Image (tube, coloured by chain):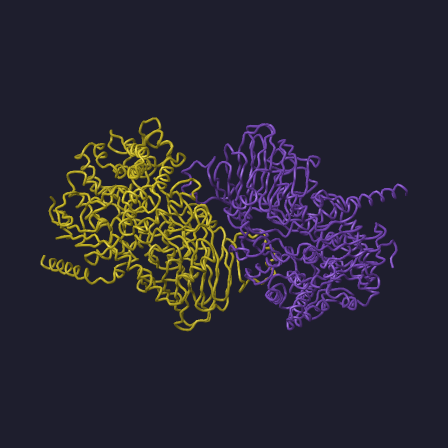
Chain colours: A yellow, B purple
């Protein structure tokens, strides 16, 4: 006991010390967190919201196996799996934490010895260009990744600027040193995915090209410019296209070596060098969504020179500045979790435009972003919940630019809809709802709307009235999506209802009463799929009866997406009071919540879940997926708010650890991490689109949040600890505060809040 | 006899009358000439050098049959064969007169009744959307084509502006009227040729999209905008892609009808209407090499309204103006041949840029043409001979812009070479030589060089020194291309030698003596492949011996391209004196020429020839291909120039007739027609790059050639007729003229020449 006490004291004093001395917060960022199992994060280099994500691939698994979906592909959503023993190369684009994928563009691998243009297999590393590696020889920092490749003894280092990946390879002495550029490789790859590829050699140290793919993004073209620090002595291409009908007169040239260009579907390139022992060959690899010239310009604009350390340092400085938006007082584990979460919230969405503001639009035309930064990679079903609300606090300008990007998307959309899942000038319609409206409403309601809010509202309304999309027509006509119309009729119904409420809030703020009336009415539709006879949300048939086959624990073909009825029945964040009433009053509701967290979920149901590990489930509460992210806070609407405090403090250490397997589910482009940040600070946006945050239990000793305009929201937490999770009292700006809800204005005006914690609940 | 004399008189007086009265020359243009058999011209609508060539396809034959080359494809180079009985639709891009092909983009077909999305087969027209038609119901004029489609009773009319095809379909009464847009169809098509296609429906009367193909042009993307004069009541797409691995979440929409977009490899679209009897549905179809927005802008810029007749009239006015650059006094047949030839010389090259000057470059970047009009479709092996020299006289500005386009091509070329065959932002390297240098030298030597001539010379030299291209390295080292290196070693050697001479002439004019010396020496290399022991050019081995297997009549695997040794042995247009000496002096040379024109070519050799009909050969003189186009003029370098006069007057009526089968070989983007024009006027550019024209026998009674700067070169021909083909005397500007050579200055300064003709040679 004594020993334990001492440790606690030490960690407290260390925390206070660190709070004063932490000039560097980057030191706490561990990109390796979440790279094992289901986190689907990647360890490689990127700057905040960077267009380049330069990271190792530990395998290139095909989406197909014998013409069918290959389930093994799933674990390679981010290209890297911690348990793997080999690296196949380093590619320039990655999603962070997704549960479906794409990207992995432009894989580069350095080798020595006999040239091998195939990756080879993991069980036989020598069979191709891949190499064994070990985590002992690996370093992953914010904007820096380093690994030794055992096969070649090459040390690979990488860093980035927004649009340029910077490689530094330290070679052994060899007259057979190679850089391989694999233009066929990709994440979630299959033979027809590369639609067209072009490479042009401008001179012996500069090439340009592009790759057009047909994947999750239906038509995605990414251009590149690749500069070498040392001229290659020769180069070559190999084309693997299944058939070539017409070769024309290209045969007039001997194209086997040193030919200046190639085009086709399946292409690999190699560049040969003589290297001295310890000689560094550096590569600058710039991307552009617009053109090869755009990529060249991006390279010139961002990385004109060859100073690897400077680029690394500049990028880490960017991270440092962004991380400093919130400083916390906590122990090392908390800091590693917290700042890695901060890091993970600033990878996606990604900047999607050239240095000169040009970008490819959803209409496949080139546009110029006038007065805003254009973003893509909007995984909105995930991120509307906490990530964008977090942005509204610590990145208000970026969040406004993201909304502007969404509005540009709307303008360019053939369907005239706001983004559902925006993927590099493409819409992939992934997941349910139309949650752009939540993001926009949240920004408007909170006064962070430096755009035409009325036009934005019109776009929201147009999206929500799109009858031909995923049952919206039936939803409007019947107040719910009939089971016959959709396999996820209940999820969609309750999510639409929430989104409609968000529209109503925005309309109210803008004085658009007719729209308010229409949508506030629609926001009650969640009730229409509640089966009071059994106390669960349940698929409802067109004739008004509930579907017969029903198991509230099942997620498979049960009317829900990434969640079962037990979890989804709690999805009415816009109306907890109404929900509680619907579900039979407070007593029954609390019992329901308690059961959720404590019941035993049989393994057969876990087998049906997606995107989470077994550890990602507490009882039947699924934290590894998003639909229940607000659930622990729902006790606040009952007489037992201390249960919220208890639950969130239980969830935090179970679901977030500073280890490779530290994430209990897909990070989902930062949503899991945003939940961590809010919850650790002591409040959470249960219903984005309101200006209120629900108070939980702060898990730090203190924090300062820069909220813009030079203001700081200061959080002081007295007597907090692993056991002292209950809030005894709160003072806001020095005065007693008795609400469980914190307003946006309270935060954004600066000021300070003090929590007094205890090991006993009130 | 008497009757004949009367007719002759009538035709002469008609001719004189016409000369005075011909306000319209368009009336003599018969686009149908050359559409039967080997002419490979098309009957559809285009404006001079227009980017759109809107013309019917009578079949869509695949380049492949059971995985092998399908020889039937060849006759559909221009999409239309006069002997065919059905039309499959009307597409927007066509080459004129080529012997290989591509294009046929965006096939449109109107139908009524049950929707059929497949073209069906010619033997069963009802099996698809194709329709029978007859020439009785067909009209083909410059910039106007009309045909009745028997299957539907629809009258189809079409006209164009530079970048917009304008369709007008007169429908019967039907509630099942359709417009089909087939985005899979194409000329020289095969399953993998469409790489990617996108269509977006902006509203119920406007769509945009693009089509990317991998054909003769390796990577060609053409964008379009399509406007309907009447809203369609519904539309649909059908996708024929062999496999679709990943459909994503697009299934949230019912995409079967009225979905606003589609993307894939193989796509057809249809648009449905209700029509009244005689109701016209008009379509404006704009193209752009740059973007969909570019196509929309082109439509706005060129055809803002819906007045079909105005667009037709404006285009025909353009033709009228261009045709009036040369007015002739001749009989109807001559006028039809002449003005159709004029027409055929002004179809290719084609303008290749948007109305705002933007175009896709060979480097696949978007460029802006600053201070010039950008052209493509340079079939230079054909056109350097007479077409570009003709342009230097009657289109000097256009020719200068074409040179500027070639120089831009050079700048954008990964190989750093001038164009060989420029095809829509692509190089297809078709045929032999590097004849851009001839075009550039001709312009420079003739003083039509409003560009940096020294830079142009550098580009010529860089091209001619490109060692890795088609034996140039060996040619430089050995003075000829060894037989081992190339299957067309002799053609290429003699053509390089001519091109080198052209470079030397340009260098001389620019005072670049070192270059002059290098290339004037190279220009004699043609002698190195002459086998004096047999009197023919002959493939020569690396060791200096001549290849054993050799047949001077054969074109198959004999060291030549599109010509046998009999014809190619005369290819030294830069040095007829040297050639005559080489071939044993004048007597033997004249005998050789006489034999060429009079010998009997056994059928087995004809079977080996390409691109010509049996009628395209006179003896063993092959007029339907280009290598001998200068040959009839070579008598001018002997003591028997009257034989030139006799030969050319024999060739003219045999090879040019005002009938569908009137061309004895591929028109080759106007080269055949340019030969006709020069020869008919009485002179020919035997060696472009010199400032001299060789005098033949004018086949008109007079002509006026507008040579720019308000000047006119006037040709008067006294006593000319079918028998009076011999030139008795010439007066230039009123003074006796005894040379057989006319200088460029004599023509371009204006002035007049009078030929006195006779039935007897001097």
Which residue is pictured at 48% across the width and 39% down the height?
B201
A679 vs A495: above or below: below
Q: Position of residue A76 (x, y in %)?
A: 37, 52
Specify the farthest residue to the top.
A543
B609 vs B451: above or below: above
B105 with respect to B98 (left or right): left
A142 vs A349: above or below: below
Q: Position of residue A57 (x, y in %)?
A: 38, 57
Q: Quadrant of the C terminus of chain B?
A: bottom right
Q: Quadrant of the N terminus of chain B?
A: top right
Q: Position of residue A593 (x, y in %)?
A: 20, 39
Which residue is pictured at 80% across the width and 50% down the height?
B701
- When asked about the image quadrant of residue A511, the answer is top left
- When asked about the image quadrant of residue A481, the answer is top left
Residue B583 visible here: yes
A178 with respect to A534 (left or right): right
Front residue of A468 and B125? A468
A656 with respect to B425 (left or right): left
Specify the farthest residue to the right.
B2
Front residue of A294 and A5? A294
Q: Position of residue B441 (x, y in %)?
A: 66, 63
Front residue of A497 and A492? A497
B358 vs A605: above or below: below
Numbered circles on residues, count? 0
């Amino acid at each position: 006991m004594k020993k334990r006490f001492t440790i606690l004291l030490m960690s407290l004093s260390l925390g206070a010390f660190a709070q004063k001395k932490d000039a560097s917060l980057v030191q706490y960022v561990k990109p390796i967190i979440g790279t094992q199992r289901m986190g689907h994060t990647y360890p490689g280099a990127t700057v905040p919201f960077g267009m380049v994500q330069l990271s190792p691939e530990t395998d290139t698994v095909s989406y197909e196996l014998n013409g069918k979906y290959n389930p093994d592909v799933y674990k390679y959503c981010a290209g890297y799996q911690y348990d793997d023993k080999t690296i196949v190369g380093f590619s320039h684009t990655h999603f962070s934490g997704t549960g479906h994928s794409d990207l992995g563009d432009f894989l580069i691998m350095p080798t020595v010895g006999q040239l091998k243009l195939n990756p080879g297999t993991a069980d036989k590393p020598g069979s191709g260009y891949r190499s064994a590696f070990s985590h002992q020889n690996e370093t992953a920092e914010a904007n820096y990744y380093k690994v030794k490749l055992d096969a070649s003894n090459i040390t690979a280092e990488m860093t980035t600027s927004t649009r340029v990946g910077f490689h530094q390879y330290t070679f052994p002495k060899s007259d057979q040193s190679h850089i391989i550029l694999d233009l066929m490789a990709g994440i979630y790859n299959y033979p027809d995915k590369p639609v067209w590829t072009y490479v042009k050699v401008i001179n012996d140290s500069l090439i340009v090209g592009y790759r057009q793919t047909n994947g999750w993004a239906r038509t995605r073209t990414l251009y590149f410019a690749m500069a070498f620090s040392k001229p290659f002595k020769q180069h070559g291409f190999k084309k693997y296209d299944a058939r070539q009908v017409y070769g024309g007169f290209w045969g007039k040239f001997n194209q086997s070596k040193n030919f200046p260009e190639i085009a086709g579907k399946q292409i690999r390139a190699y560049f040969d060098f003589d290297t001295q022992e310890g000689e560094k060959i550096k590569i600058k690899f710039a991307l552009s969504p617009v053109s090869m010239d755009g990529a060249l310009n991006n390279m010139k604009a961002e990385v004109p020179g060859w100073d690897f350390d400077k680029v690394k340092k500049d990028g880490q400085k960017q991270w440092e500045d962004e991380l400093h938006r919130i400083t916390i007082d906590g122990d090392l584990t908390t800091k590693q979790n917290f700042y890695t979460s901060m890091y993970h919230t600033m990878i996606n969405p990604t900047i999607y435009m050239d240095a000169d503001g040009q970008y490819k639009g959803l209409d496949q035309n080139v546009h110029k972003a006038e007065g805003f930064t254009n973003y893509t990679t909007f995984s909105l079903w995930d991120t509307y919940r906490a990530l964008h609300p977090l942005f509204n606090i610590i990145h208000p300008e970026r969040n406004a630019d993201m909304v502007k990007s969404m509005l540009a998307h709307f303008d360019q959309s053939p369907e005239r809809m706001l983004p559902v899942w925006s993927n590099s000038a493409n819409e992939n319609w992934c997941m349910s709802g139309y949650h752009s409206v939540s993001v926009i409403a949240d920004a408007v309601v909170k006064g962070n709307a430096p755009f035409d809010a009325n036009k934005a509202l019109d776009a929201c309304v147009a999206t929500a009235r799109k009858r031909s999309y995923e049952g919206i027509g039936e939803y409007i006509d019947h107040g719910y999506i009939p089971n016959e119309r959709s396999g996820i009729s209940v999820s969609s119904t309750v999510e639409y209802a929430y989104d409609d409420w968000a529209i109503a809030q925005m309309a109210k703020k803008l004085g658009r009463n007719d729209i308010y009336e229409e949508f506030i009415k629609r926001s009650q539709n969640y009730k229409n799929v509640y089966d009071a006879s059994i106390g669960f949300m349940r698929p409802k048939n067109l004739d008004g009866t509930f579907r017969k086959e029903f198991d509230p624990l099942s997620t498979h073909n049960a009317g829900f997406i990434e969640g079962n009825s037990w979890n989804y029945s709690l999805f009415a964040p816009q109306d907890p009071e109404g929900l509680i009433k619907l579900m039979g009053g407070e007593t029954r509701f609390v019992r329901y919540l308690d059961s959720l967290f404590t019941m035993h979920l049989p393994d057969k149901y876990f087998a049906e879940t997606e995107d989470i590990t077994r550890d990602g489930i507490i009882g039947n509460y699924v934290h590894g997926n998003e639909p229940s992210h607000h659930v622990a806070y729902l006790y606040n609407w009952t007489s037992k708010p201390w249960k919220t405090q208890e639950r969130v403090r239980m969830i935090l250490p179970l679901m977030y650890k500073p280890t490779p397997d530290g994430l209990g589910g897909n990070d989902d482009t930062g949503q899991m991490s945003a939940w961590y940040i809010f919850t650790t600070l002591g409040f959470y946006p249960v219903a984005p689109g309101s200006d209120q945050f629900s108070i939980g239990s702060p898990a730090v000793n203190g924090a300062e949040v820069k909220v813009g305009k030079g203001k700081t929201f200061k959080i002081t937490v007295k007597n907090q600890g692993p056991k002292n999770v209950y809030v005894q009292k709160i003072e806001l700006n020095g005065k007693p505060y008795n609400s469980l809800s914190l307003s946006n204005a309270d935060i954004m005006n600066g000021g300070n809040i003090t929590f007094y914690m205890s090991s006993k609940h009130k």
